[in-house]
Image: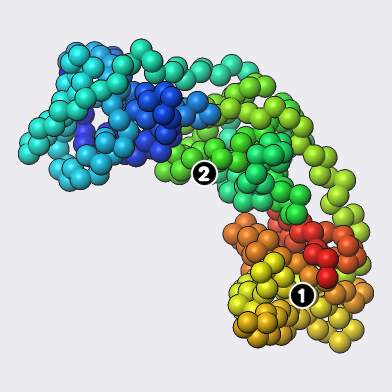
Amino acid sequence: MKIECEVNKIKNAISQVEKITGKNLTLPVLNSILLTASGKSLKLRATNLSLGVEVEIPSKIEKEGVVAISGSILTNIFSNVFENDNVFLEGDDGNLAIKTKKSKIKLKGQPCDDFPTIPKVDGITFEIEVKKFLDGIKSVYYSSSVSDIKPEISSVYIYGDGEDLVFVSTDSFRLAEKKVKLKNSEEVSGMLIPFKNIPEILRVFSESSGFLTVCFNKNQVSFSSDNIYLTSRIIDGVFPDYRQIIPKNKKTEAVVLKQDLLNALKISNIFSDKFNQVNLLINPKNKVFELSSSNNDVGENKTQIDATLEGEEVELSFNYKYFLDCFQSIDTDSMSVKFEGTSKPITITPISDRSFTYLIMPMNR
């Protein structure tokens, strides 16, 4: 291998793929980034067997070749290279020489033959704006279960419904659903992307624009945009039929300013107990929307906020952290909080935005 490429382009490519390198003691080559020089480009590839990513950058190829080099070492080197010039890479006997105007570095490589291939996924394909897809995932993934005991809820479920692509996640204590517009979404029969893979998918495509091509079958899903190709395994399971638990009616509704409620929750958090319990009292007749919490070691707190109220009086407790999490998915200034009863889920939606719905199960008082 003998190539020349821009320092900034290879630096960005390394940062995109390095975090997907595995920390695998039984298969050390997974700690590496595979560099493949061919045609007019350099491809950088990494995998941890659950996720795989390949980033392609234009390069001047004098001699084609392949080397596998430790991802962490490449990251450390290029994070400290501040030159804006070109870099020269030369591979020989599985090792790599890196040359810039001011540096000459030699690195030992791993056997390339042991490096796993990244599958080219064949299946149902659709296109969606990168921003819309990432927004859909970001709006819900924090509600996934972090435990692998039930893999089907330790995931983000994506499926088509009419002209919407729907993103859903739940840990059985709360549930988030986000809908984004997508023509021909009925072709998307449904896929479960592992929660552990979501942060890396978001990170890798965070700087991308334009459209994302998504292709999936029962085992794998691939995402490609511009010069990036990423694959993830899909969980084999059935997501719960969550729509039957979404309350159809309401006995009480409160419309509040998002910032007012956020401030009140943060104050209540200071006084909440080890279970993060916050109490809520809504009395439409007396126009009361009150949050309260108490802690034997800290003290107690009651905070009232202005709200438009209707319906019956309701009093219940909830985990303030679950409530707080949904604010990142609400872009409007005001939000609706609905109740069907003290033992039914609390339903939270942005005002004038039907694309996002969030449910929280109340705590036993």
Left or right of 104 in this view: 162:
right
Residue 51: numbered disc: none
Determine the residue positioned at 42% across, 43% down.
207
Asked if residue 233 is positioned above or below residue 253 in the image, the reply reads: above
Residue 199: numbered disc: 2
Give the image location of residue 172, x and y in percent.
76, 49
The residue beneath circle 1 is 279
Asked if residue 341 is positioned above or below residue 140 in the image, the reply reads: below
Asked if marks 1 and 2 touch (Cβ < 8 Å), the reply is no
Query: Could you say which quadrant of the image residue 155 lies in?
Result: top right
Determine the residue positioned at 67% across, 46% down.
145
Q: CA distance from mark 1 to mark 2?
A: 32 Å
The residue lying furthest to the left in this view is 102
Q: Local crowd at mark 1 within 10 Å, few (<14), some, or many (≥20)?
A: many
Give the image location of residue 252, x and y in percent.
88, 70
- Visible residue check, residue 353: yes
- Visible residue check, residue 320: no
Query: Could you say which quadrant of the image residue 87 lies in?
Result: top left
Left or right of 121 in this view: 280:
right
Q: Amino acid at mark 2?
A: Pro
Q: Amino acid at mark 1?
A: Asn
Determine the residue positioned at 80% across, 63% down.
362
Q: Nearer the viewer, mark 1 or mark 2?
A: 1
Query: Could you say which quadrant of the image residue 301 lies in?
Result: bottom right
Q: How is the image coloured?
A: rainbow
Label 2: which secondary element: helix
Picture quarter with the C terminus: bottom right
Label 1: which secondary element: strand
